[in-house]
Image (spheres, rainbow, N blue to C red):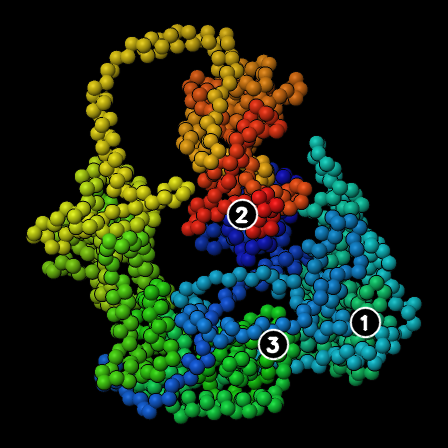
Amino acid sequence: MADKEQVIQALRATLISVKGALTIKQCNRDYRELQGEPIPFKKLGYSTLDKLFLDVPGFKVTQVNGEWYVDAIASQDTQHIAAMVSRQKSSKKATPKLNYPNRFPKKQGSWRKPASTHYSSNYNNQYSNQLYRVKAPFNNNNQYHKNNKYNSKPNETKPLLPNVKQNTKVTSDHVEKISKSSNSSHSLRDANLHNDEFKQPVRNHAETETKQSGKVSASQRLSNLRDRLNTVDLIPLQLPAATNECLESSGPVTNVVPAHNLEPPPNTTSSVEKLAWTCKKLGLPEPVYKVKDMGPKRGPVSYDCTVKVGTYSAGSYPNSSPSEELAKEVAAVKLLAIIESSEADGMPTSSSSKAIAYLTELVSEHEAGLWATIVPHMYRQKYGENLPSNWQELVENCPNIIKDRVVNGRLVLLPNKEQDAMPPYVETSVADDPLESDLPPLQFPENDFWNVFVTVANSTLEIWLRIIGPHYSDAFETLLADMSSYYENYGTCVEKSMIIKNAWYAVNLDDGGWQRAKILEIEEDMATVFLGDHGDDDVVYLHKIKILEPQFRELPAQAILCRLEGAEELAASALGAELVRRRLPGEVLVAAPGPRHDPTDPSVAVVLYDTSTQRDLNLNKEIVHDFCIAGAFTVTQKPCEVEVGCVTEEGRVWVSRAGGAALVRGALALLTAGPYRRPLPAAPQAPPPAPGALYIVRTLAGDWVRCTIISGLDGEGTVRTQLVDSGLILRAPLSSLVPLQTFSPALNAFPHQALAVRLGAAERAAAALVARLRELVLGARVLCRALAPAAAQPPAPHAPHAAPHVALFVRTGPQNILASVNDAIIMEYDYLQQDKVKEDEKDTTNHVEALHKKKERIFRSRSILGDDRLTSGASLPAPPLPAPGKCFDVYIAMAASPWNFVVQPNSTRHTLQTMMTSLQTECPKLSELDAPINPASGELYTVYYDKDASWYRVTVAGTVSSEMVSVYFCDYGDLALFEPKALRPIPTGAPLARTLPPQAIKARLYDVWPLHQDWTVEDCIRFQELCVEQQFVGICKDVGKDPLNPNEPLLTLDLIDTSTDEDIYLNKRLVAEGRARLASAS
């Protein structure tokens, strides 16, 4: 693609499709993936790629730290795409909510502060007078209460807007597809927004993108919360709505002058004619079309068209058309979308209030009305600004403009003379400023201890609680009672279009009554809200949302976000989160808040005490203690999944509980980076006298890991350390070690995750087969089981803590069969010992073999030059076929349908790969002089396939012409056409290629029939997705003949996928998906 215009268009498409700027290297990479070649800047006359972007207009190029970044400036026809990309985001995953009873404390007689505390008395001056402002919601992923009421409420349904289609049609399906892609939002607005049957506006296409959900770690969620706490909340302002009664009373043409003054659009399906009419109505010059023939020399004809009207221009590229007329239609569709769009480059966008005032003025100047499609252009021409993207929604609620549908279902805007004229727009500094609607900040008690009720506990970093007291919990209960009494009879409902995100409202929960909530997301007739007095999220129907009256805004939001001081690292593991969820929600406790070192951190560090018993319990320490007990790792005679962290040169194996080492790395990562980073203590001056002290050290990969020192200090200031969670030995400078006891007492008490084990009887062979042992267990899923005392060697009397003897197992093959590592090591060791003895006894002088090699060297040239058939024409041996009822492990190489696919035997795949490797080495040595003159059907050759740059074995299937033959890839099942000069004989350096049977065996799936006469395209594609390039266990049901070629066998196989816990029969899966029927059931 060397045409400059096409390259620029492709570059713009590449950059607009991503959010934010790309480096020039990233842009070149994405361009290569989309176009199949790098950016051809040299063909366009530029010496470097950055000079191309700097020279061509429409790109924004910046340099940051020596790196060039490039972004595309959205044009008229790409503005809507850029807007959609910029608004893409992931929605929150639906999460279980707390049960309603947990939102209020259990009644208790009194609370008392704990007997002792380590906090200083000056805490009151540091902290208690600070204001805590709960403004932002927090994503609640609480999984503790599984059977909560919120997930079991009935599914209420409301009628949705029907999918009203356009009345006008485009010339062909081709143009219709282009119209939908380039003008979707315009079509929806013109067709749906002003239908009198509905009062809710249709959502913009960009706002109805498919949402993605995903888990977010606790540290990421807390980091996101910093920004959300600083949002400005709004009170929804109710605009006057145009009701159906207004339209019904006035009638469609009451306020319109005679109809001939409003020229109707042409009653035609041609976009070219519509464009000409639009240009005439707007006083624009006539459209100028330029059509180019873009078709290849060989292949179908295709045309591209560009059309220009004044300052507007559009092109049909990349949608080529088979005719000039169709190309003009496509270009006209796109240009109409641009003219009728509310966006244009280089112009500011009017505010909502200004747009309503100007639209009222514009429509009042045309008593006969204005077609809605030409309003954006006239607005730009008159006021020099773009309309807001939701301008039709604003018009919907404007009493000074009447909407009506007349000719061809087109929308007409008419001035409403019966309504008092809107005063002209006056530019003021507060016209668009929303009213501040946030709740007042919460002021903490001046006491050193708070009586609190825990409402939500998701992890040690996310605990929501309420303070108990007259000014807090008592005032909150009074507020709830007042809200319930008021909103049962009064209150203002809010229309969906007027609901503002991050604003406070009153919501009616199914089992919680009326509550104060902040709107997070709106989707269809539901809204996700954050309950600021509880700390959790909920989902409510829109009709259960009302305006939060001023008298209910005086009390601050009661939920306080806290974290457990000294136990933050536990949030990095699921184990720590589970302990918190099990212990804290619904409890009435005493909290000792700590000083706030970071004013931007929204959470309060607290120590929680349980004073309901005679002995005060420090729950922070209790949770850490439970965390350490749950982390203990031992091996028993019950199999457990482990990770092998290290195999030493002596054959010693270190195992750890699956996920144990990753848990520690994640906890250390949370403490060494991000908002909860702790200062690192000073390194030790010398190795400690007592062994066993724990340190942390940073590996070359950048991870912090736990270790102990196992050697003295050498002359270079380094020591040998052993990683206690993997068993690896690492030499590190003493100055790089960090004492763990000072840095994290919780992780210092957490048990070592790595355990040294012995392999019983296999230990004698492990030292000789270290490489093989590592190949079997490192990076694999390993099961570990302690050996019974009788099978293990008895420990020495002086070694009470000797490593236990274990048996290790790994899963192998497509069946995932458990194989014993111990037995495999012993068998391979014994086999190697036997081979060594045989080699010593073998006679190294084999006279017959030497004679054959001598004859081959002497007569080799004659064989090659005189008889091609010795290396090319010989037929291959027949492939070994299974007997009916036998298992046949296969690899699916190609599939056309369930009745036509090609399998390769799993047993010879390694041999096939060896042969292919030799072909890639030996075939390039052959020249075109070695090509056969008259290749005959059935003869064996090799051929170079340029699509994947590899050599393959082929057999001649037939002669198409004197210059073309059809060949069959006998190992993969494909057919292709080649010139005879492209064929090469089997090279003598690849003898395996002359003896290995053909690996491609045709097959059909057992016991399935299509639902109709034949397999549909969708069925075939789905079958390919399920099986191609995958391994299966096949049960041979029948060995027959291929109906198209009786000389080739055809297997009927029942394919079974054994890679999962439950075996999956492929024929039954097709039936379950509604794509096939069982022949036996018919």
Report crowding for label 2: few under 14, some 14 to 19, many 20 or more residues within 10 A (C-alpha): some
Residue assigned mark 1 = 404
Q: Is residue 718 among what the camera can see? A: no
- Of callouts 1 and 2, the N-terminal one: 1
- The span from disc 1 to disc 3 (Cα, nearest Å) is 28 Å
Q: Secondary structure at mark 2?
A: helix
Q: Callout 2, which amino acid?
A: Lys
| Residue depicted at x 65% and y 78% | 495
Tell me whether the residue at label 1 lies in contact with that at label 3, contact meaning CB atoms closer than 8 angstroms.
no
Residue assigned mark 2 = 1068
**Splitting the image into 4 quarters, where does residue 398 fall?**
bottom right
Q: Secondary structure at mark 1?
A: strand
Report crowding for label 3: few under 14, some 14 to 19, many 20 or more residues within 10 A (C-alpha): many
Residue 960 appears at what percent x and percent y? 66, 21
**Splitting the image into 4 quarters, where does residue 486 fall?**
bottom right
Task: State the residue in front, 900 or 1025.
Answer: 900
Circle on res. 542: 3
- For marks 1 and 3, give the one nearer the viewer: 3
Quadrant where the image shows the C terminus: top right
Residue 722 appears at what percent x and percent y? 21, 52
Q: Is residue 466 among what the camera can see? A: yes
Tell me whether the residue at label 3 lies in contact with that at label 2, contact meaning CB atoms closer than 8 angstroms.
no
- Of callouts 1 and 3, the N-terminal one: 1
Task: State the residue in front, 257 or 1047.
Answer: 1047
Residue 920 appears at what percent x and percent y? 45, 26
Above or below — where is 113 with respect to 35?
Answer: below
Task: State the residue in front, 166 or 1079.
Answer: 1079
Q: Secondary structure at mark 3?
A: helix
Above or below — where is 554 with respect to 411?
Answer: below
